């Protein structure tokens, strides 16, 4: 019925509203006469004129005030104010008419009573229409509004409850709060329940959603609440932290999925601001791979430390444009004098890198550009090596030539005893920097016919860490997409375990580690306990208010499918090759000095590698990497697309009859 009325033509609905108002005019006039004469009234004589002029006066005035343009199910205070103004004008005109005409049998007080009655009846019908018709939004497609509990009865919870009530996107049941003295109180007519009764309240009211409105709670307390809610199969969402809420009034748009750090369940360490600014403040800084997940976050952290110039280098035009626009807005908001320079270019092009270093003479380079997707690099090994190995060499070479003081390589735990090309390339990149750092003077050219001997004054360091949550290629955005689509969640193996860290935390630690570099350092980020990917999948499903479909619960919502390990993928990752990691001044940063080849020997291997890349001899490339990288053991057969396609082509040609 509601849906039929909502979908009537606009003119038909306006006609119905006008007819109702005409009826209200007549009814309110009859009631006014009956109240004034203290008897049930039947009009006679001149009294009929009082009935006739009521709609004649009211309809033009109501039309003028726009009372028939409003959408009733969305009317609010503004519409009621318009009704009050319209009835006030009508009342003045109606009273003036009755007094001026002096109609026999028509008391002048009817001119006061009738508009008052009319206002209450017109306003009442509008309010009823809003209440009744707005319920149709939840009936559409058989859906009803979600039933929400707000965890936190403070100012943030009260504000968002008021917004949700007006927007009618959720049916707010009440509040939960940790403070016993709040239990039983009413906030905007909503009851506050003690947090200890969460299970009873969720079951009693069939709650579907819980909103965490506790921005001042510690991370540990948030994790306790989230763990408590997991078993109830409710969708858990959150409000921003206090720093975000300070920016203005809370809006429905502020409600978001749980933070990545909530999924991680670990307390981040506050950054050391002195370390953050040491290599950045009022200096020229270059970030390679500035448009990537880590590179872009490094840029955000660097902007906060206010360099004089920030050079953004990336080969992807759209990524570079996006991060430049974002950072430009941030610089304007800060009111800082920071020169942002977006530079298109590839680290595989030494001439381009050398031009950039010669022109701006960067003080610090954060080298984040790399191909990091394990299966893609495994299928395209030559390009992976050109970018990750020779690209790193190009940037390091330019840094030495043009006197860059600090060079920081963003590395990965996959460089430790790798089973894939990507991990091996990152370990070779580390070895290049270690070799250069241990030689006071080096011949940088990889070709015997050229000499380019330089004094090494650049402090090289590398920071090795595991997976970053919510980065491009991370399992978290993939799992969210799969959960939103109704599943299944795809998992390579039930035993896959990874170290995890958030992107902002990783970027902050990279900057802080580099500030403690002495030269040739391998920094390891303390990432807590490794997490099984399947446990992360279960956690995300449960906190979405859904259940996992498995042998124990075949009626579950989301299925988890095991697809098998991909080329080059490991079950477990490590951060340290040896056993000599030492603590630093930062509780989350370790320092290691690992064995490596000397530069004269390493550059011979690099020259050989360049020759093999030209021929795309993947078998020989893997053999050379195995010689260079300690513990490198390819996990499978060669899966390079070009190599295998050429092999199949040659086999097909050999099978053809002569």
Image (tube, rainbow, N blue to C red):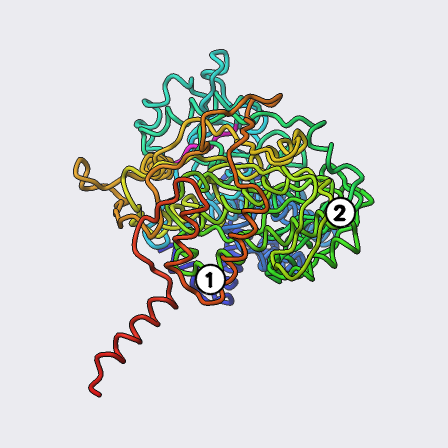
Relative to residue 232, is residue 629 drawn left or right?
right
The answer to whether one can see residue 458 in this image is yes
Q: Considering only vertical position in the picture, is 456 above or below 451?
A: above
Which residue carries the number 2 mark?
A: 362
Q: Considering only vertical position in the picture, is 1 above or below 265?
A: below
Nearer to us of marks 1 and 2 is: 1
**Considering the image in quadrants, where does the C terminus appear?**
bottom left
Instruction: Identify the residue shown where x is 60% and y is 23%.
Output: 586
Provide residue 154's location: percent of width, then percent of height: 56, 23
Image quadrant in which you'd find residue 202: top left
- Write the start and end of the magenta stretch as one range: 209-213
The answer to whether one can see residue 90 in this image is no
Relative to residue 210, is residue 284 drawn left or right?
right
Q: Which residue is most to the right? A: 337
Q: Secondary structure at mark 2?
A: loop
**Considering the image in quadrants, where does the N terminus appear?**
bottom left
Check disc 2: other Cα within 10 Å, few if <14, some if 14-19, many if 20+. many
Where residue 612 is drawn, which disc sits there? Answer: 1
Instruction: Identify the residue shown where x is 31% and y is 70%.
Output: 647
Q: Which sits in the foreground, 356 or 281?
A: 356
Provide residue 453's location: percent of width, then percent of height: 71, 50
In reply to whether residue 212 is colored magenta, the answer given is yes
Q: Which sits in the foreground, 55 or 579?
A: 579
Relative to residue 104, is residue 598 drawn left or right?
left
Relative to residue 191, is residue 110 drawn left or right?
right
Provide residue 577's location: percent of width, then percent of height: 45, 33
């Amino acid at each position: 019925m509601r849906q039929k009325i909502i979908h009537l033509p606009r003119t038909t609905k306006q006609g119905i509203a006008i007819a109702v108002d005409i009826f209200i005019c007549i009814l309110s006039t009859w009631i006014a006469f009956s109240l004034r004469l203290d008897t049930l009234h039947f009009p006679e004589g001149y009294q009929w004129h009082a009935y006739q002029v009521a709609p004649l006066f009211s309809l033009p005035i109501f039309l003028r005030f726009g009372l028939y343009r409003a959408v009733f199910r969305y009317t609010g205070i503004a519409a009621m104010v318009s009704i009050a103004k319209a009835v006030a004008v009508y009342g003045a005109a109606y009273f003036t008419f009755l007094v001026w005409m002096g109609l026999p049998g028509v008391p002048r007080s009817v001119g006061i009573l009738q508009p008052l009655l009319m206002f209450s009846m017109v306003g009442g019908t509008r309010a009823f229409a809003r209440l009744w018709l707005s319920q149709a939004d939840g009936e559409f497609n058989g859906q009803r509004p979600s039933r929400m509990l707000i965890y936190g009865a403070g100012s943030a919870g009260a504000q968002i409850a008021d917004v949700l009530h007006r927007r009618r996107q959720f049916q707010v049941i009440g509040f939960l709060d940790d403070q016993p003295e709040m239990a039983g109180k009413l906030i905007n007519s909503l009851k506050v329940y003690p947090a200890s009764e969460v299970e009873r309240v969720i079951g009693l009211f069939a709650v579907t959603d819980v909103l965490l409105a506790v921005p001042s709670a510690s991370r540990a307390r948030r994790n306790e609440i989230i763990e408590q809610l997991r078993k109830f199969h409710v969708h858990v969402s959150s409000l921003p932290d206090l720093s975000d809420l300070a920016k203005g009034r809370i809006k429905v748009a502020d409600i978001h999925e749980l933070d990545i750090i909530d999924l991680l369940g670990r307390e981040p360490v506050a950054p050391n601001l002195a370390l953050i600014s040491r290599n950045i403040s009022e200096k020229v800084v270059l970030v390679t791979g500035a448009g990537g997940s880590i590179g872009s976050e490094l840029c955000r952290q660097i902007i906060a430390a206010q360099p004089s110039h920030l050079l953004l280098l990336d080969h992807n035009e759209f990524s570079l444009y996006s991060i430049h626009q974002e950072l430009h807005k941030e610089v304007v908001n800060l009111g800082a004098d920071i020169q942002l320079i977006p530079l298109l270019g590839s680290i595989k092009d030494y001439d381009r890198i050398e031009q950039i270093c010669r022109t701006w003479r960067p003080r610090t380079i954060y080298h984040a550009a790399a191909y990091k997707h394990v299966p893609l690099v495994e299928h395209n090994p030559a390009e992976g090596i050109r970018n990750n190995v020779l690209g790193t060499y190009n940037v390091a070479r330019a840094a030495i030539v043009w006197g860059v003081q600090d060079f920081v390589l963003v590395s990965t735990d996959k460089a430790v005893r790798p089973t894939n090309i990507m991990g091996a390339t990152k370990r070779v990149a580390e070895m290049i920097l270690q070799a250069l750092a241990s030689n006071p003077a080096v011949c940088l050219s990889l070709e015997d016919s050229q000499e380019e001997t330089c004094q090494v004054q650049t402090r090289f360091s590398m920071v090795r860490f595991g997976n970053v949550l919510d980065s491009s290629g991370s399992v978290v955005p993939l799992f969210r997409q799969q959960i939103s689509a109704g599943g299944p969640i795809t998992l390579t193996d039930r035993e896959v375990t990874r170290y995890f860290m958030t992107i902002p935390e990783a970027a902050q630690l990279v900057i802080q580690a580099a500030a403690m570099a002495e030269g040739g350092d391998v920094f390891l980020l303390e990432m807590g306990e490794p997490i099984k990917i399947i446990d992360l999948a279960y956690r995300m499903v449960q906190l979405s208010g859904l259940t996992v479909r498995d042998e124990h619960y075949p009626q579950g919502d989301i299925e988890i499918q095991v697809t098998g390990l991909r080329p080059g993928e490991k079950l477990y990752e490590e951060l340290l090759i040896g056993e000599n990691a030492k603590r630093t001044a930062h509780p989350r940063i370790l320092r290691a000095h690992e064995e490596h080849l000397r530069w004269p020997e390493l550059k011979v291997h690099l020259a050989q590698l360049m020759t093999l890349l030209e021929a795309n001899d993947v078998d020989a490339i893997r053999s050379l990497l195995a010689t260079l990288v300690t513990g490198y053991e390819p996990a499978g057969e060669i899966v390079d697309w070009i190599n295998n396609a050429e092999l199949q082509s040659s086999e097909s040609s050999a099978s053809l009859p002569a």
